[in-house]
Amino acid sequence: MKNSPPRTTHHALLFILCTLLLLALACGGSAPTAAPEAPPTADTQATVDAAIAATSMAQAGIQATIDAGIQATSAAAPPTATTAPTPVAANDYLTLTEEELALLIDQAVNDAVSATEQASTATTRAAADDDLTAEEVQSVEIYVAGAEEAIALAEELIDIYDDLYGELATETVDLLLAADDDLEAMAASLAALATALVEIEDDLAQGIALAAETIEQIENTAQGASAQVSQTQAQIQAWLGSAQAERQARAEDLAAVHPDSVPADLQATLQSALSFLQTVQGALSDNKLSRDELNAIAQLGANTSAGLEAYGGPQLQGLASKITEITDQLARGQIPQARSGLQDFESLLSSVPGGPGVNRPARP
């Protein structure tokens, strides 16, 4: 992941996004285990719809800022200052599944692309007569600021995905980071355009006539930003489809894992079940999951399930089904649901007469 300066100006939009998504998730409960990812269940679809709607609201806020700024410039007044952004707690992102976050990224990138195209079009339109007025410059600046805000939102979501799921989605994360590189190129062009507009605004305020080369320069810079649009969209679409296929393949691979060390008796099986619980808790303690950790969990789960089948009897088959469910959820990046299932597994294991004591570690 690239080291980039902290972003603060777009946190208010992201706060709206996360708040709406949290409300949707709170109403949904744990997602059921299913072999394929598509089609989603009604609860999952409702969550996804809410997520996309939340991102659209963020973009609508950007557009509202643009419209307000343009209205202000038409009256030769500067845009109204916005309120300070509200910080967003990092733990809010832990409520998202890998798929939900991927869909938010897709929507945010589309919004960033649209805003960049608007900024480029506004620049070309303003410079079409080979001249610029102060009002036209201020109007274009509003569009550029909106595009920069939209790109920053998309980049932040990508950074979050890379941090939470980058060690799990190892086969496809490079496609996402390539799209992030395109967004950075767009942002660099927009930053250059914003700098040029400020200089033009200063010249106009001093009564300095604009050279034709200056106007041509901002047109070329704006076109440079929009030149990345098609490639960025293609990169994101390629990543979105590949990431979904990777999640499905992970689930299928882990479902096919066979036991390699079956416990010798019931007591050893229950100890193995306790080890499964503690291994998953430890793997999720840093709020991330690597592919190596997932493979180890799947193998331990297969061994424990084999022991439960051999020695557990009907009364302990609930533990075996929970192991299958939790492993599948982890494979699909459904970390919040897996955490909930792990709590149920812990309760079941604690209630087994003569079973191992469950020492509960501190929750992250």
Image (cartoon, rainbow, N blue to C red):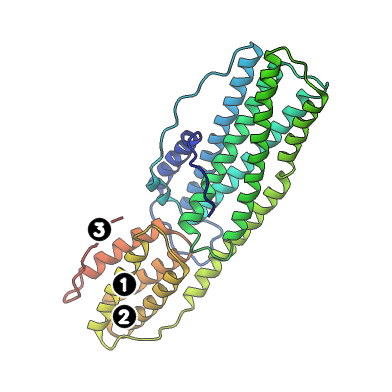
Q: Nearer the viewer, mark 3 or mark 2?
A: 3
Tell me the distance, in whole angstroms, between the alpha carbons under discs 2 and 1: 8 Å
Q: Please name the residue shown 30% across and 85% down the image.
A: 263
Residue 58 percent coordinates (x, y):
53, 35
Q: Quadrant of the C terminus?
A: bottom left
Give the amino acid type for the residue marked by disc 1 in the picture.
Leu
Give the amino acid type for the residue marked by disc 2 in the picture.
Leu
* Precedes in sequence: disc 1 or disc 3: 1
**Going by the image, does 262 lie left or right of 57?**
left
**Going by the image, does 237 lie left or right of 250?**
right
Q: Residue furthest bottom?
A: 264
* Precedes in sequence: disc 2 or disc 1: 2
Q: Residue at label 1?
A: 319
Task: Please give the label number shown on residue 362.
Answer: 3
Secondary element at image label 1: helix
Query: Is residue 173 at least partly visible in the picture?
Result: yes
Query: Is residue 113 at least partly visible in the picture?
Result: no
Residue 105 percent coordinates (x, y):
56, 48
Secondary element at image label 3: loop
**Cβ atoms at labels 2 and 1 below 8 Å apart:** yes
Residue 125 percent coordinates (x, y):
77, 25
* Precedes in sequence: disc 3 or disc 2: 2
Tell me the distance, in whole angstroms, between the alpha carbons under discs 1 and 3: 22 Å
Which one is in front, 154 or 63? 154
Vertical order, 265 against 83 (above or below)? below
Q: Residue at label 2?
A: 308
Secondary element at image label 2: helix
Give the amino acid type for the residue marked by disc 3 in the picture.
Ala
